[in-house]
Amino acid sequence: DAKTTQPPSMDCAEGRAANLPCNHSTISGNEYVYWYRQIHSQGPQYIIHGLKNNETNEMASLIITEDRKSSTLILPHATLRDTAVYYCIVRDIIQGAQKLVFGQGTRLTINP
Amino acid sequence: NAGVMQNPRHLVRRRGQEARLRCSPMKGHSHVYWYRQLPEEGLKFMVYLQKENIIDESGMPKERFSAEFPKEGPSILRIQQVVRGDSAAYFCASSPSRWDSYGYTFGSGTRLTVV
């Protein structure tokens, strides 16, 4: 079972920042937070991941709370092509062979 | 630098036939994962393979489904005697090792339709 809770859907205006929340209150010390997205039934696409520090790459920023029980994915300037289902996943990479377990995700709709 | 290649992209089978889905991982990746996505549902893990070994098949249905990843060639997901409920998108992903922190790279999927 997925260890994360996300809102089922969100809307955002084009050009604005999209902030997607995720709760992972049972996260353990070795578990990373990953974000993937799936655009219209294509294969899931890796976005970003982090352990405890905030992370930023060319696609997004990841803000993890100090207690690590929740995080927020930020798409700074959303475009129509960012419309997708966004999945927040926790994964232990120290124990090894930990598969990615997808929940229901958040369906993000970017409106013109 | 090709990504994860899955073929065919679309596959139509009649009930009772066999379906073979192929997955070629990214160059340098020796770990392969198969996921299934039923219509309007999330992705469900099926099986994790390393070259010539099945590491985790906890998500595989007990009957009719099998997977292999031979020393040479692509990984194959085989579904025998398909039924309408097998209609789904099947995604393959690969990683260079089980401890790679960047997670997996996914292919574009094979859409199986059973008629």
Image (cartoon, coloured by chain):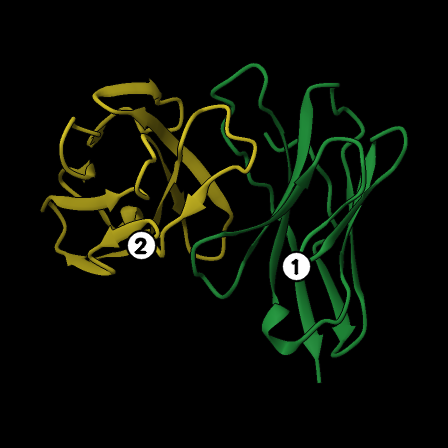
Chain colours: A green, B yellow
Instruction: Give me the residue at 15% from left, 44% from top.
Output: B20
The residue identified by callout 1 is A58
Q: Secondary structure at mark 1?
A: loop
Pinpoint the chain carrying mark 2.
Answer: B
Is the C terminus of chain B in the top left, top right, bottom left or bottom right quadrant?
A: bottom left
The Cα atoms of the two marked residues, 2 and 1, are separated by: 21 Å
Is the N terminus of chain B in the top left, top right, bottom left or bottom right quadrant?
A: bottom left
Query: Around disc 2, counting alpha carbons within 10 Å, would you say few (fewer than 14), some (14 to 19), or many (20 or more)?
Result: few
Query: Which residue lies most toward the top here?
Result: A95
Residue A87 or residue A66, whichever sits in front: A66
On the same chain: label 2 and label 1? Answer: no
With B31 as the anchor, is B67 left or right in this view? left
Res. B115 visible in picture: no
Give coordinates of residue A64: x percent, y percent: 82, 39
Residue type highlighted by circle 1: Glu
Pinpoint the chain carrying mark 1.
Answer: A
Which disc, if any, is residue B2? Answer: 2
Give coordinates of residue B106: x percent, y percent: 41, 48
Contact? badges 2 and 1 (CB < 8 Å): no
Instruction: Give me the residue at 41% from left, 50% from top.
Output: B38
Q: Is residue A62 above or below residue B49?
A: below
Give coordinates of residue A107: x percent, y percent: 65, 60
Residue type highlighted by circle 2: Ala
Q: Secondary structure at mark 2?
A: loop
Res. B80 visible in picture: yes
Locate residue A50: give its quadrant: top right
Instruction: Give me the residue at 49% from left, 57% from top.
Output: B40
Which disc, if any, is residue B106? Answer: none
Give coordinates of residue B77: x percent, y percent: 22, 38
